[in-house]
Each structure stands twice: as C-alpha cells, then as structure tokens.
Image (cartoon, rainbow, N blue to C red):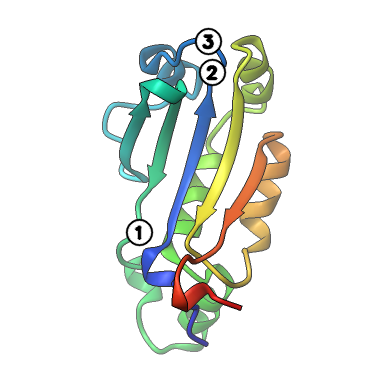
Amino acid sequence: MTKRGSDQLRVYLEIHDPFRFDLRVMRKVLDLSDHDPLIKATEVTEERNTGKFVFSGGSWPEDMQGDTGRAVEFRDQWKRVEFLHASEWLRRRPPSLPERLRQQEVESYLVVEGYHGIIPQELLKEVVRLGLEFEVIGPIGPQGAH
C-alpha cells in the first residue's frame, strides 16, 4: 500500500521552551550524544524557542531487507524506517525523562509530518511511556487532499 505524501515524511521530537531554548541543556536532559546515528538533524528556531531532533530514515536493517516472510512482516509492522528509529531512540530514554522535562518547564511533542497511514503501536507505546504529546501533520497539497 502506498502512503500519500510519505516521501516527505519527517518524524521529530520537538521541544518548546516558553522562555529560551538552550540546546546544550536540552541535549543533557535528553541524554543525547553528539553523534547519535538515529538523529539526522537538530534544528533550533530561536524566534519560537523551539528545538527539533529529527529522526533519520534510510535503509532497513540489513537482515530485514530481503523478501523473506520475516523481513516483509517486519517492514509491514514498522511502515517506515523513521518510525523504527524514533521508537529505538525513545526506548533508550530513561523512565526519569518525563520528570526531567517537567523540571525544565518545557513542552515536548513527537511530531509525524507529511504522513497518511498507520502509526506503529510500538512507537505509540514509547510516546505514552515518556508522557510526550503526539502531533500528526498530514500531507500538504494535492497528495494530501481528502
């Protein structure tokens, strides 16, 4: 099944600080290393006091790229590599993360942008476990028209 607008998919953790977004502090709160392969970009918008940590897409794990039943089932379960990477990254965050975010008085969202389709349950479980808000911004333009 083809997902409308899925070539423009972006999955990211967005952090909004009502006062001043400090990337150095937020990287520490999130326990984010300098070169995390699951994060392809960090975007800071100072005017909005917002930081986005964009999850990488790319290829499926090597053992899940073939036509075996197991590989096809795995890809069908996860839908997109970005969802797999976001889930893996969130799963590695400690259970104390929600409290650490509250102490910083920031708002945190997992955002799925440019996608129309099913969101994998495993990703949703991590969103709930970490107390994140969840936002879906569907495809824009003719592909996303209903």
Q: How far separated are the C-alphas under marks 2 and 3?
A: 5 Å
Residue 84: x %, y % from top left:
49, 58
Q: Are the two marked residues, 2 and 3, in contact with CB atoms closer than 8 angstroms?
A: yes
The amino acid marked with disc number 3 is: Phe
Q: Is residue 137 above or below residue 117?
A: above
Amino acid at the residue labelled 1: Gly
Residue 35: quadrant of the picture: top left
Let me know if residue 110 appears in the view.
Answer: yes
Q: Residues within 10 Å of mark 3 (few under 14, many from 20)?
A: few
| Camera-side mark, 2 or 1 | 2
Q: Which badge, 2 or 1, comes first in the chain's sequence?
A: 2
Residue located beneath label 2 in the image: 17
100 versus 15 height, above or below: above
Residue at position x 56%, y 71% from top? 116
Q: CA distance from mark 3 to mark 1?
A: 32 Å
- Provide the secondary structure element on which disc 2 rests: loop
- Badge 1 is on which residue? 57
Residue 91 seen in the current view? no
Q: Residue under label 3, please give it.
A: 19
Between label 3 and label 1, give the one nearer the viewer: 3
Image quadrant in which the C terminus is located: bottom right
Q: Amino acid at mark 2?
A: Asp
